[in-house]
Structures are given as C-alpha cells and as structure tokens.
Image (cartoon, rainbow, N blue to C red):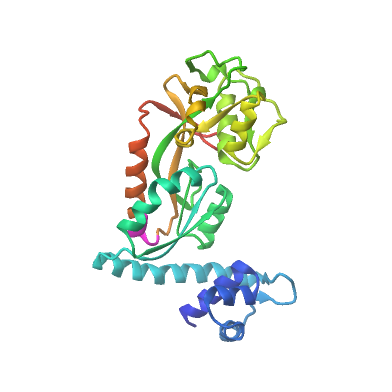
C-alpha cells in the first residue's frame, strides 16, 4: 500500500471516472487502474463498483475512502511541518470563494498576495457555500472564503472582516428621501433578491425577519448578480441591498442611490474556512494577513450587527 495508490483512489472517488482521475493525476488511465487494482488485491476487497456509470463506491469502499483521506492528510501534514521549520511558504493551494464575495475581493488582494508569495500556486474556484463545505470535507479544497457562522463541527472559521449591508434606493422608492434607513423600514415585498442558493440572499431574508416587515414566501424578481439587481432597481422595480465592498465600484452618477443603515449597521461576517485537520497552515496564515489587512483598510464601519446566513447568531 502506498500514498500514491491512496491518492489515486481518492481522485477516482471524487470524479467517479478512471479516465478523468488519470487526467487529474497526470498518469495514464491503465497505470492508475493497475495501481488501484493492486491495492484492492492487497486488501482483498473491491473499493469501486465498476458495473455502474458513474462509478459507485462499495460499502467497504466508503469506509476505505474516509481512512485513505485521513492517511493522505497526515502524510501531507508531515510536509507542512518541514515547510514551517524551513520558513517555506509555497506549493499548490486550492481556494474556494463564494460568488457574492469573489468579484470584489479577488481584485483587492490577489496581486498583493502573489507578489508577496510568488511560490504559492493558487487555484481559485467560485463555489457556493454548500460546495465549499463539501469539498473541504472531501479534501478537495485547502480553504474557502464564505459568509459565516456556519456552525459545522468539521469546519474551522477565522473571521477576515465584517461587511455592512448598504441599501440601493432610487428616486421613485418610498425610502429615497431618507438620509439613512433602519432595519424596521424594510419590506421584503419591494426588495430585489439574489436567486435561491446565495447566502447573501439568506442574510437579507433573515434581516427582514428581525424587523416588523412582512416576509412573503414568493418573490417575483430574483437575479444571479448584483449588477442585474441594480439595473432592475434603476427601472423602478424595487430597492435592493448590496454588500459594502460591491458599492465601491458603483458609478459616480448612482452614488446618490446608496443609503447606509443607522448604526449598528447590519453586516455579514466573512471568514476563511478550513477543515478541522488544518493542513497548509502557513499558506492560510499568509492569506489571512493579506486579505484582512487590505479589506479592513477599506471598511471604515465600527458599529455593526452580524446577520447570520443561516438565521443563527
């Protein structure tokens, strides 16, 4: 049994296909298949049910995969220890970022990070929160950036920054004349929302649940991007709420439509996530230092109230 064989098994389990797994591990498909078959013969079990498409794990295979992940993680931890002792910060690093954070955060920190840590090879994917959690647990991500708290016992959270909500309200809306707004002013029936699946949408709904506004069960206008919500609002179809960093890119002529909340301003907590095994800590620490330093300098709000994406404090 070798670490390489276990890595091959994990890759097949992830992609449910020998050919795709071989491509990802940069070996030929026969080589990968042969190594997995050797492992199965050594253990005298079948890890994969090859009669199905896509491949499925056998019952014992499911247990083997979990153990293989633990062994590979511990092997990689040994390299982490050596890297830390040498002061080395580098290597491949897979980072997931949720869609409502990625467009504004990446331009703020990516160049600074790559300049400071040129030996780190970042692979960044845009993933929703559930995908980030699943891939962290499966060992297919090293870290993720998402809105928290998530209250998942397998995931550790370290807060990067607190990002206030800002209202975008045009002239024909009932709240346009207000210099600032209160949570109690909100009515979910005239707020344009992101599509289902975005944690920022859940935060807005949870915010409205804390006010006296009526929270309906159906919403006629939903979109996958803040840009579309702004355009719909400009057409007089309702107001919307934006994360503060997104407002930094608002056109000058639209700045007058931004309305801040009376403090404490509702805000979301954005954290860097890791699996509890905490591999590659030196790279995570480097990401934390760069991102928190850059973003906290851009957000001047002091008094905020965190709105959880899952409706919990």
Residue 183, given in percent of the width and then of the height, sits at 52, 20
In the drawing, does residue 92 fall left or right of residue 201? Answer: left
- Compare residues 193 and 17 and report the one nearer the observer: 193
Residue 201, given in percent of the width and then of the height, sits at 59, 35
In the drawing, does residue 151 fall left or right of residue 51? Answer: left
Residue 312, given in percent of the width and then of the height, sits at 52, 34
Q: Quadrant of residue 228?
A: top right
Q: Residue furthest front?
A: 253
Residue at figure coordinates x 51%, y 74% from the top left: 7
Residue 308 vertical position relative to residue 117 in the rendered view, above or below: above
How many labels were placed on the picture?
Answer: 0
Residue 261, given in percent of the width and then of the height, sits at 47, 21
Find out whether residue 241 is within the magenta segment: no
Q: Quadrant of residue 204?
A: top right
- Compare residues 170 and 98 and report the one nearer the observer: 170
Q: Start and end of the magenta stretch?
A: 279-284
Q: Quadrant of residue 168?
A: top right
Residue at figure coordinates x 55%, y 29% from the top left: 241
Residue 283 vertical position relative to residue 235 in the rendered view, above or below: below
- Compare residues 215 and 229 and report the one nearer the observer: 229
Which secondary structure class fits the magenta region best? Answer: helix
Q: Is residue 16 visible?
A: yes
Residue at figure coordinates x 60%, y 72% from the top left: 12
In the drawing, does residue 1 fall left or right of residue 301? Answer: right
Q: Is residue 64 visible?
A: no
Residue 207 vertical position relative to residue 39 in the rendered view, above or below: above
């Amino acid at each position: 049994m070798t670490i390489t064989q276990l890595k091959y098994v994990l890759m097949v389990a992830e992609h449910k296909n020998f050919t795709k797994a071989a491509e990802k591990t940069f070996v030929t498909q026969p080589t990968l298949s042969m190594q997995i078959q050797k492992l199965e013969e050594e253990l005298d079990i079948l890890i994969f049910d090859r009669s199905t498409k896509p491949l499925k794990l056998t019952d014992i295979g499911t247990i083997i995969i979990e153990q293989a992940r633990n062994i590979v993680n511990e092997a990689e931890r040994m390299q982490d220890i050596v890297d830390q002792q040498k002061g080395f910060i580098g290597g491949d690093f897979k980072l997931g970022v949720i869609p409502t954070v990625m467009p504004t955060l990446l331009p703020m920190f990516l160049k600074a990070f790559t300049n400071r840590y040129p030996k780190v090879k970042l692979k960044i994917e845009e993933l929703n929160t559930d995908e980030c959690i699943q891939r962290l647990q499966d060992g297919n991500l090293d870290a993720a950036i998402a809105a928290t708290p998530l209250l998942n016992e397998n995931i550790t959270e370290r807060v990067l920054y607190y990002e206030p909500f800002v209202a975008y309200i045009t002239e024909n809306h009932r709240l346009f004349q207000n210099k600032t707004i209160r949570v109690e002013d909100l009515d979910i029936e005239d707020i344009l929302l992101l599509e289902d699946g975005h944690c920022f949408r859940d935060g807005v709904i949870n915010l409205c649940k804390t006010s006296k506004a009526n929270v309906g069960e159906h919403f006629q206008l939903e979109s996958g991007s803040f840009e579309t919500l702004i355009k719909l609002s400009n057409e007089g179809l309702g107001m919307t709420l934006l994360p503060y960093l997104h407002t930094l890119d608002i056109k000058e002529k639209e700045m007058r439509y931004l309305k801040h909340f009376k403090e404490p301003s509702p805000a979301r907590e954005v954290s860097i996530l890791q699996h509890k095994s905490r591999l590659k800590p030196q790279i995570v620490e480097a990401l934390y230092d760069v991102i928190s330093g850059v973003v906290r300098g851009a957000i001047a709000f002091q008094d905020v109230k965190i709105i959880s994406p899952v409706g919990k404090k």
